[in-house]
């Protein structure tokens, strides 16, 4: 068996047949960096470990990028639901009978205005959030859950 045949077998034990083109491109590019004049397959054998490391690094980087993209997408969907939930709770509050709204606002005021916080934008925001939460807990059937919302928004989430 010739030396090139042995080298080819060794390369194919390390590199999948579908990746041989990638390996050859990598090895020849690395050889050019050092002005190494490759004459035979044996001259490329030295680049196997570097190719394997580079391939692993690319796989790790691609996996990390894909994970980050999934996390970003999940976060965007979660934020979209939070905006939907808030808008739906606000709309529900506006449609409640006055007596119910006043009761919810009274409960929210008692909860959202601790004595340490002075009246102002922060207390207004805390009050609005408390009103939403109290109304949603009293009328849970009026605001779709995240899963229900996702079921109706599969196209938007895809």
Image (cartoon, rainbow, N blue to C red):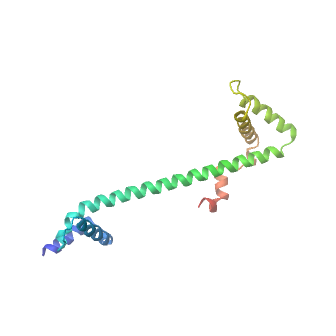
Q: Position of residue 100 (x, y in %)?
A: 84, 38
User: 15 left or right of 43?
Assistant: right
Above/below status of 152 relative to 6: above
Q: Position of residue 79 (x, y in %)?
A: 62, 49
Number of marks in picture: 0
Q: Residue furthest top?
A: 115
Above/below status of 34 relative to 123: below
Above/below status of 36 relative to 100: below
Above/below status of 118 relative to 95: above
The residue that appears at 76% across and 48% down in the rendered structure is 142
Q: Nearer the viewer, residue 133 or 127?
A: 127
Placement of the C terminus among the 4 image quadrants: bottom right
Q: Position of residue 113 (x, y in %)?
A: 72, 29
Q: Position of residue 132 (x, y in %)?
A: 73, 41
Placement of the N terminus among the 4 image quadrants: bottom left
Q: Nearer the viewer, residue 25 or 18?
A: 25
Q: Residue furthest right?
A: 98
User: 86 left or right of 98?
Assistant: left
The residue that appears at 82% across and 34% down in the rendered structure is 103
Q: In the picture, residue 14 is in which quadrant?
A: bottom left
User: 96 left or right of 19?
Assistant: right
Q: In the picture, residue 106 is in which quadrant?
A: top right
């Amino acid at each position: 068996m010739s030396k090139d045949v042995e080298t080819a077998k060794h390369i194919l034990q390390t590199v999948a047949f579908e990746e041989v083109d990638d390996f050859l491109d990598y090895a020849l590019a690395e050889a050019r960096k050092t002005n190494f004049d490759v004459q035979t397959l044996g001259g490329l054998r030295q680049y196997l470990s570097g190719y394997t490391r580079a391939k692993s690094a690319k796989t790790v980087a691609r996996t990390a990028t894909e994970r980050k993209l999934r996390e970003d997408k999940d976060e965007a969907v979660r934020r979209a639901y939070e905006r939907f939930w808030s808008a739906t709770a606000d709309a529900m509050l506006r449609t409640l009978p006055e007596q119910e709204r006043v009761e919810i606002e009274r409960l929210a005021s008692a909860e959202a205005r601790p004595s340490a916080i002075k009246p102002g934008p922060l207390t207004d925001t805390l009050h609005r959030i408390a009103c939403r939460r109290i109304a949603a807990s009293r009328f849970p059937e009026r605001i779709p859950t995240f899963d229900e919302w996702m079921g109706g928004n599969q196209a938007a989430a895809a």
